Amino acid sequence: KQVATFGNSVKKLGAAIGVTFATTQIIRLGQASIRAADVQLKAEQSLLVALEGRKDVQERLIKQAADLQKLTLFGDEETIRAQALIAAFVDEEETIRRIIPLVQDLAAAKQMQLSAAADLVSKTLGSTTNALARYGIQVEGAVGSSERLETLANALTKAFGGQAQAMAAVDITFTQLKNRWGDFTEKLGVGLQKAILEVADLIQFALNPAL
């Protein structure tokens, strides 16, 4: 009887531990999802501000970031932040779309953060400073001119073209899979955020209906 009683106690304890573990994991997933959504939403908002509120352009650039995520090791939120940095200096959508893959190539080749590579390229493209001179990149033409864009794009292509996709082709750390999981958690986080805000509104109304 004592053994049977002990066995039943162990089963109950195991079930309780299982429930606690599952609950903990769900809470952690919720927290991670909200953090991921926060990063994504802030990147998208930064891009929209840099584009001076041009929502249609923002949506197309976000689509480009999602497409590039499938081909490279860069998450779409990283690419969107890079687009925002370029957009701070460049107004034309096509210029941003053309230069972003080359920014990824530079970052992959030099093993630097994508935002750091975007900062160097944006300064070179949108100011009189050639921030890429130390990497052997030479540019010509006035700031904002098509000549400056062409010489920069050609120089980056010649020096680093194809590096981002080449790194993705030999990656063994499942980075692209993790990026796709990140997309899932971002969507989950947005949903949780909306649900939390709705519950907060209901609580506020219950406490003070006059508001």
Image (cartoon, grey):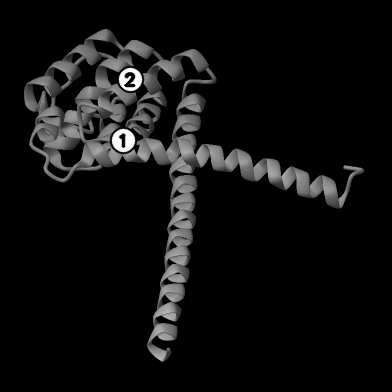
* Location of residue 87 by image quarter: top left
User: Relative to residue 135, is residue 44 drawn left or right?
Assistant: right
C-alpha separation, residue under disc 2 versus residue under disc 1: 15 Å
User: Relative to residue 103, is residue 1 drawn left or right?
Assistant: right
Which residue is situated farthest in the front direction here? 1
Residue type, numbered disc 1: Arg
Residue 206 placed where, x, y %?
84, 49
In this rendering, is residue 131 above or below 51? below
> What residue do we see at 42% from left, 26% from top?
88
Helix, strand or loop at label 1? It is helix
Which residue is labeled 2 in the image? 64
Residue 140 placed where, x, y %?
19, 16
* Location of residue 151 by image quarter: top left
Q: Front-most of 39 and 29?
A: 29
**Which quadrant holds the C terminus?**
top right
> What residue do we see at 71% from left, 47% from top?
200
Answer with mark 2 or mark 1, whichever residue precedes in sequence.
2
Mark in the foreground, 2 or 1: 1
In this rendering, is residue 153 above or below 33? above
Residue 125 placed where, x, y %?
28, 22
Which residue is situated farthest in the right direction here? 210
Residue type, numbered disc 2: Gln
> What residue do we see at 45% from left, 80% from top?
9
- Kindly tell me whether residue 62 is visible in this rendering: yes
Q: Residue 180 carries which label?
A: 1
Helix, strand or loop at label 2? It is helix
User: Relative to residue 190, is residue 169 drawn left or right?
Assistant: left
In this rendering, is residue 65 above or below 41? above
